[in-house]
Image: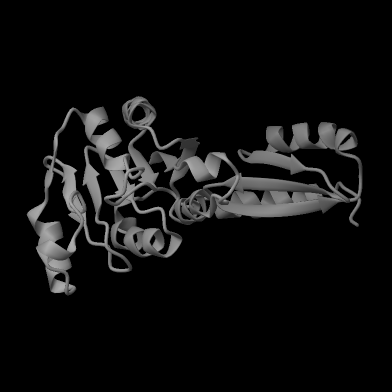
Amino acid sequence: MNVAVVTVGDELLAGRTTDTNATWLCERFAERGVGVERVTTVPDRVADIARVVNEYRAAYEAVVVTGGLGPTHDDVTMEGVAAALGRDLEEHEAALAWLEEDGYSRADLTEGTTELPAGARALHNEAGVAPGAVLEGVYVLPGVPDEMKTMFETIAPEFTGDPTYREEVVAAEPESALLDRIALLRQEFDVSVGSYPGESVRIAIESTDEATVAAAAAWLRDRVESP
């Protein structure tokens, strides 16, 4: 399964808020064997949200959008997703019922709080107020990290794939000196390889076959200088 992650917020693009949501989601997807092929941040603008969501839903099995939920003037994510899917926004009775169970009356809620794209499945916000939504492979989650994480756990089983196994080999050599051995490693084993220089070079070996990863890592460790 492959997915794209879209985070929404002018504050993210301005550097005033660190985008921890994207990192957390990528980690969860990796644990589930789901490939993340795009991570994109867009401003609080309906047209930008709609354009990116529409493009990505045609290319990936799921699009996960976080941020910009709620009734305030800059919470336009639901409107953008609705535009991408060609749907109107309408009050969702199940979302309203959940909030009433949590102690909110209709009069307590700001207008627009429970408006979701027509036909969407509502996602209850157990850690906040603004509901999420699922429609046509697009998952819309809150931007507040605690709310996003809590809501994601309710839909996590919907994201599945083959687990990827990973081992790292650390080499006390320049990255350029390792190119020939990395090339041989790729010839010998069906693995993906990434190298990350620093004080030492970390060589990451990944595959969906655990035994292949272990064998490839052992092969390489025998052929590099350890720190």
Which corner quadrant of the image does residue 44 belong to? top left
Q: Nearer the viewer, residue 225 or 6?
A: 6
What residue is rendered at 32% in x and 44% in y?
A: 73
Q: Residue at x 76, y 43 (%)?
A: 196
| Relative to 117, residue 163 above or below | below
**What residue occupies the far left of the structure in this picture?**
93
Q: Position of residue 147 (x, y in %)?
A: 37, 62
Please tell me in which quadrant of the rendered image residue 47 appears. Answer: top left
* Vertical side of 128 occupied by 111: above or below: above
Q: Which residue is located at x 48 percent, y 40 percent?
A: 10
Q: Position of residue 144 (x, y in %)?
A: 42, 58
The residue closer to the viewer here, 67 or 196, is 67
Q: What colour-coding does the image apply?
A: one colour
Q: Which of the pair 151/143 is nearer the observer?
A: 143
Please state if 206 lies on the left or on the right of 227 as rendered.
left
> Where is residue 14 drawn, in percent x and y?
57, 40
Decide if residue 22 is on the left or right side of residue 128.
right
Answer above or below: position of 154 versus 39. below
Tally the marks: 0
Q: Position of residue 134 (x, y in %)?
A: 23, 46
Please tell me which residue is depicted at 33% across the width and 51% down the height of the picture: 141
The N terminus sits in image quarter? top left
The quarter of the rendered structure image containing the C terminus is: bottom right
